[in-house]
Image (cartoon, rainbow, N blue to C red):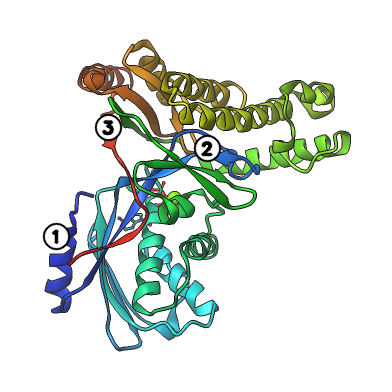
């Protein structure tokens, strides 16, 4: 997982003996707004300089020839035989299948792709893969779909072929991001506002715990059900459509007994996180990064104590970050039960922070965590060849 655009281009030219078009498709971070994309909330993602490079060309045939550099595996399949397969092939074929469902005249193509994003590390390598394929084919075949339509197509592809019932955040960030901005994405209306990210003097550091507890998938579905149940009860008692219509946490109190402790805690987290994300957007506009960072720590507390999706490895990293005066905000990012933390760290403090936290983590868990310094970039785009 350390391919550059030159590597991918070279592999393509060796395999297919022609010149490709080149594209970059980014992974994403999410500054705040966790586990609320499926609860009609607001989230704050941005595309990053970790992603996947694509070398691709139409081949005037009815065949897809596609090579994954990272897995050193290829598929060769006629367009008429596109079907569910396994692993990375499902993300490529899933996108082709969605174009076909729209009756768009897709052509055969040759493609090689690989990147510098951790795969399955919570930075949404899956949306990067879908986005690179959909964006490039849309351009090369001249389908004229817009970026938002492509994001929605990518989400459908992920639902239908790999079978992951993801929200819209990852694909939306992959397509719609702009350089040096984050977006406040309204997951109910699927629309966004751009907010400049003025973080001069600070770095965004991700630390990958390198653990992925098997609870993640089942607990994710469980949380979705718990929130649905909670919302049903709230809808009966309050005049609301969704969690975002609750503007004060105290409005939940009268329902505590009916909900039971567990569902009450889930709902409390969701209501608080939606309010927190809106507040975070205001603070970011006012350039109050310190205040913003405090909200990130609060999100982590909520995910740990109320939503209960953290784990000891993530808590260890966030606790250690909190003790470091150069870290102004940190929290688990993504679904939880492993994956990465996101940290906002003073530029001059990054080295000493990492020199302390990585060995301490190793000592505690005997695992080599990995860190990434990420920059916020624009969404999927063509690269000059
Ligand atoms: P993530 O958080 O990175 O999106 P997912 O589990 O949603 O994790 O998606 C990871 C899957 O996406 C991988 O198992 C693989 O099938 C596919 N994938 C992602 N990146 C690549 C890549 N660079 N090369 C091949 N397949 C990839
Ligand atoms: Mg994914």
Find out whether the residues at labels 3 and 2 contact each other: C-beta distance under 8 Å. Answer: no
Q: Within 8 Å: ligand 1 and the Cβ of disc 3?
A: no
Q: Residue 126 occupies which quadrant of the picture? A: bottom left
Q: Could you tell me residue 338's position as x and y percent?
A: 43, 33
Q: Any mark on residue 215, and which?
A: 2
Question: Could you classify mark 2 by the number of other residues whose Cα lies within 10 Å: few (under 14), some (14-19), or many (20 or more)?
Answer: few
Q: Is residue 204 left or right of residue 227?
A: left
User: Is disc 2 placed on a helix, strand or loop?
Assistant: helix
Q: Mark 3 vs mark 2: give the one in front.
A: 3
Looking at the picture, how far across and down is residue 300, in whole percent?
A: 50, 24
**Which residue carries the number 3 mark?**
371
Where residue 6 is drawn, which disc sits there? Answer: 1
Whole-angstrom CA distance, mark 3 to mark 2, is 24 Å
In the rendered image, residue 238, in percent from the top left (x then y), is placed at 85, 34
Mark count? 3
Front residue of this view, candidates 318 and 201: 201
Q: Quadrant of residue 221?
A: top right
Out of 81 and 18, give the one closest to the viewer: 18
Q: Earlier in the sequence, mark 3 or mark 1?
A: 1
User: Circle 3 — which element?
Assistant: strand
Going from N to C along the chain, the mark reached first, 2 or 1, is 1
The quarter of the rendered structure image containing the C terminus is bottom left
Left or right, 77 with respect to 232, comes to: left
Which residue, as the protein is rendered here, is positioned at the far right?
237
Q: Is residue 122 visible?
A: no
């Amino acid at each position: 997982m350390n391919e550059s655009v030159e590597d991918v281009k070279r592999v393509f030219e060796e395999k297919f003996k022609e010149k490709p078009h080149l594209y970059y498709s980014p992974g994403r971070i999410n500054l705040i707004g966790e586990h609320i994309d499926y609860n009609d909330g607001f989230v704050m993602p941005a595309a990053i300089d970790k992603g996947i490079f694509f070398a691709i060309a139409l081949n005037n045939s009815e065949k897809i020839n596609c090579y994954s550099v990272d897995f050193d595996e290829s598929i060769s399949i006629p367009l008429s035989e596109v079907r569910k397969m396994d692993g990375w092939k499902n993300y490529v074929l899933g996108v082709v299948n969605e174009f076909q469902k729209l009756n768009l005249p897709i052509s055969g193509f040759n493609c090689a792709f690989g990147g510098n994003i951790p795969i399955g590390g919570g930075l949404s390598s899956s949306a990067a893969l879908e986005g690179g394929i959909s964006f490039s084919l849309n351009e090369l075949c001249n389908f004229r779909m817009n970026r938002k339509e492509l994001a929605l197509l990518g989400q459908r592809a992920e639902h239908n072929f790999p079978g992951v019932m993801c929200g819209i955040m990852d694909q939306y960030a992959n397509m719609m991001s702009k350089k040096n901005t984050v977006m406040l994405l309204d997951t109910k209306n699927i629309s966004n506002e751009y907010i400049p990210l003025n973080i001069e003097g600070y770095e965004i550091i991700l630390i990958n715990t390198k653990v992925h507890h098997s609870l993640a998938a089942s607990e994710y579905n469980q949380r979705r059900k718990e929130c649905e149940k909670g919302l049903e009860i709230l809808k009966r008692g309050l005049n609301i459509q969704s969690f975002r219509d609750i503007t004060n946490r105290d409005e939940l109190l009268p329902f505590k007994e009916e909900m039971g402790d567990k569902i009450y805690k889930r709902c409390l987290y969701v209501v608080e996180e939606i309010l927190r994300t809106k507040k975070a957007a205001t603070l970011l506009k006012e350039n109050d990064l310190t205040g913003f960072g405090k909200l990130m720590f609060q999100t982590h507390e909520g995910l740990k104590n109320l939503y209960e999706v953290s784990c000891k490895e993530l808590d260890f990293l966030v606790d250690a970050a909190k003790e470091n005066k150069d870290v102004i905000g940190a929290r688990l990012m993504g679904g939880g039960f492993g994956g990465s933390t996101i940290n906002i760290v003073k530029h001059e403090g990054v080295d000493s922070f990492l020199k302390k936290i990585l060995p301490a983590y190793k000592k505690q868990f005997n695992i080599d965590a990995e860190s990434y310094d990420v920059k916020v970039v624009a969404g999927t785009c063509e690269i000059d060849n």
